[in-house]
């Protein structure tokens, strides 16, 4: 049973937490790892072109801001899932615990689940621009 009085606030907290996570990870790649450092990681550790560093960082920052604001958050959540699946695939060989050398896969997996929940359940309260992804059923008013 869904408590319709409090569910929008729970979804808001989830949306805010995911948005802050994406924003902070994008900013971390600029201010801590540096763009050249992240580009080097992509090419040397993941086998991806280093030129993807700036687009990846931009997607994380913009996606995080859109989630925080609740601007098409359901669609944004879906669009961010492939990036987190990439992180998951990188961490998969390291085992379950994220504190393992190289980081484990449970944190990226949990974030994918959070993104799916947000996409299915909706933006929640305080969304600037909510957009229905799936048709919703409204209760008939007598």
Image (cartoon, helix red, strand yellow):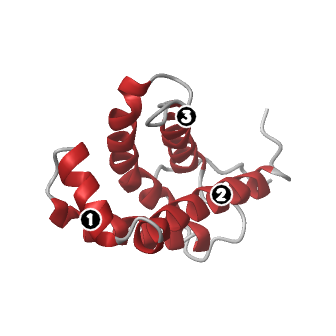
Quadrant in the rendering for residue 69: bottom right
Judge depth for marks 1 and 2 and give the one in front: 1
Q: Is residue 135 left or right of residue 125?
A: left
Image point (42%, 26%), residue name:
94
Q: Earlier in the sequence, mark 2 or mark 3?
A: 2
Label 2: which secondary element? helix
Q: Earlier in the sequence, mark 3 or mark 1?
A: 1
Q: How far, Cα to Cα, is label 2 from label 3?
A: 19 Å
> Which residue is more in the foreground, 96 or 40?
40
Image point (32%, 42%), residue name:
86
Crowd rating for badge 2 (residues with CA inside 10 Å; few <14, some 14–19, many 20+) = some
Percent coordinates x, y for residue 139 in the rendering:
71, 49
Per the image, the residue denoted by label 2 is 17
Per the image, the residue denoted by label 3 is 98
Crowd rating for badge 3 (residues with CA inside 10 Å; few <14, some 14–19, many 20+) = some
Crowd rating for badge 1 (residues with CA inside 10 Å; few <14, some 14–19, many 20+) = many
> Which residue is more in the foreground, 45 or 3?
45
Image point (66%, 51%), residue name:
138
Q: Earlier in the sequence, mark 1 or mark 2?
A: 2
Label 3: which secondary element? loop
Percent coordinates x, y for residue 120 in the rendering:
54, 44
Percent coordinates x, y for residue 71 in the rendering:
52, 72
Image point (17%, 50%), residue name:
48
Marks counted in the figure total 3
Per the image, the residue denoted by label 1 is 53
> Contact (CB < 8 A) between labels 2 and 3?
no
> Which residue is more in the foreground, 17 or 75?
17
Q: How far, Cα to Cα, is label 3 from label 1?
A: 23 Å
Label 1: which secondary element? helix
User: Is any part of residue 141 visible from this angle?
Assistant: no
């Amino acid at each position: 049973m869904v408590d319709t009085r409090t569910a929008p606030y729970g979804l808001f907290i989830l949306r805010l937490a995911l948005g802050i996570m994406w924003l902070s990870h994008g900013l971390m790649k600029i201010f801590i790892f540096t763009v050249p450092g992240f580009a080097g990681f992509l090419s040397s550790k993941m086998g991806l072109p280093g030129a993807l560093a700036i687009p990846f960082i931009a997607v994380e920052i913009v996606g995080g801001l859109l989630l925080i604001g609740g601007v098409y958050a359901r669609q944004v959540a879906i669009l961010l899932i492939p990036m987190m699946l990439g992180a998951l695939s990188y961490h998969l060989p390291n085992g379950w615990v994220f504190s393992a050398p190289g980081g484990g896969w449970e944190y990226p997996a949990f974030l994918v689940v959070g993104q799916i929940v947000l996409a299915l359940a909706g933006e929640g309260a305080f969304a600037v621009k909510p957009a229905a992804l799936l048709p919703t059923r409204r209760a008939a008013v007598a």
